Image (cartoon, coloured by chain):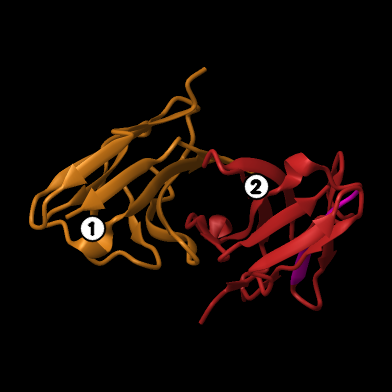
Chain colours: A red, B orange
Amino acid sequence: AQKITQTQPGMFVQEKEAVTLDCTYDTSDPSYGLFWYKQPSSGEMIFLIYQGSYDQQNATEGRYSLNFQKARKSANLVISASQLGDSAMYFCAMREGWMNRDDKIIFGKGTRLHILP
Amino acid sequence: NAGVTQTPKFQVLKTGQSMTLQCAQDMNHNSMYWYRQDPGMGLRLIYYSASEGTTDKGEVPNGYNVSRLNKREFSLRLESAAPSQTSVYFCASSEGEKLFFGSGTQLSVL
C-alpha cells in the first residue's frame, strides 16, 4: 500500500499567488518526520522543509510552510507569493523507524508545479 | 565540503553486464540510501542502511545488491543489468532533519 500520496500530478498557478501542494501519509510509527523537496529541471534535490511528528507548531522556512494536520495524516506544503523560479517538481517524503534504529525514508510520486507569468 | 559524492554520473550498459555505483559521504552520517527515479514514479527506495554494518531492503530491491563498506561508503551493485533498470539513481545520507543527495547517476541499459 502506498504510504505517501501526492494526488496532484500537475498544477498551474499564476505568479504571486499562494500554492498548496497536497501530501497524505500512512504510518503506525508514533515517531516520524515529513520532508518536502524541490527538484528543478537541473535534477538536483533541494531540501525545503521538515516537520517532526512531535513538533507542536507547523514548520516554516521563508516562503514555505507546512500545514501539518496529524489527525488527518496530511502534511501539505504552502508556498506563499509564488515566483517563476518555483516551477519544478515537488516531492513529499516520510521518515519512520529511527527510534528503532531503522530510519527508512520513502517518497511520494511528486507534483509538477508550473508558475505562469 | 563535498557532501555526498556518487560515481559515475553517466553509464551505458548492455543487458547482462554488471556494474557498481559508488557513493561516499563526508558528513559522518549513520543512515545512507539508494533511490531510483523514473518518470511518473517519484523516487523509489531500493536499499538503505541505518548504520554501519546493517542494510535493509526498500520498496524495489529486486535485481540489486548493496554493501555498506564503512560509515562513509554505500555501494549499489547490479549483477546482471536489465533494460528495466534504466533509470536515474540517487544516493543520499541523513542525520536528523535533512536528507542530503548526491548529484545522481543516469544509467541506460540497452
**Above/below status of B68 relative to A57:** above
**Image location of residue B98, percent across then percent down:** 62, 42
Label 2 amino acid?
A: Lys
**Could you say which is closer to the camera, residue A93 or residue B48?**
A93
Q: Secondary structure at mark 2?
A: strand
Marks 2, 1 in one chain: no
**Could you say which is closer to the camera, residue A84 or residue B13?**
A84
Q: Nearer the viewer, mark 2 or mark 1?
A: 2
Q: Residue at x 62, y 74 (%)?
A: A27
Question: Does the image show residue A77?
Answer: no
Residue A79 part of the magenta segment = yes
Residue A12 part of the magenta segment = no
Q: Dot 2, crowdedness within 10 Å: few (<14), some or many (≥20)?
A: many
Q: Which residues are magenta?
A: A74-80
Q: Residue at x 58, y 57 (%)?
A: A99
What residue occupies the far left of the structure in this picture?
B16
A84 sits left or right of B105 in the view: right
**Image location of residue A68, percent across then percent down:** 82, 64
**Above/below status of A89 relative to B6:** below
**Could you say which is closer to the camera, residue B18 or residue A105?**
B18
Task: Provide the chain ID for the residue under circle 2.
Answer: A
Q: Residue at x 25, y 67 (%)?
A: B62
What residue occupies the far top of the structure in this picture?
B1
Q: Which residue is mark 1?
A: B64
Q: Which residue is mark 2?
A: A38
Label 1 amino acid?
A: Tyr
Q: CA distance from mark 2 to mark 1?
A: 27 Å
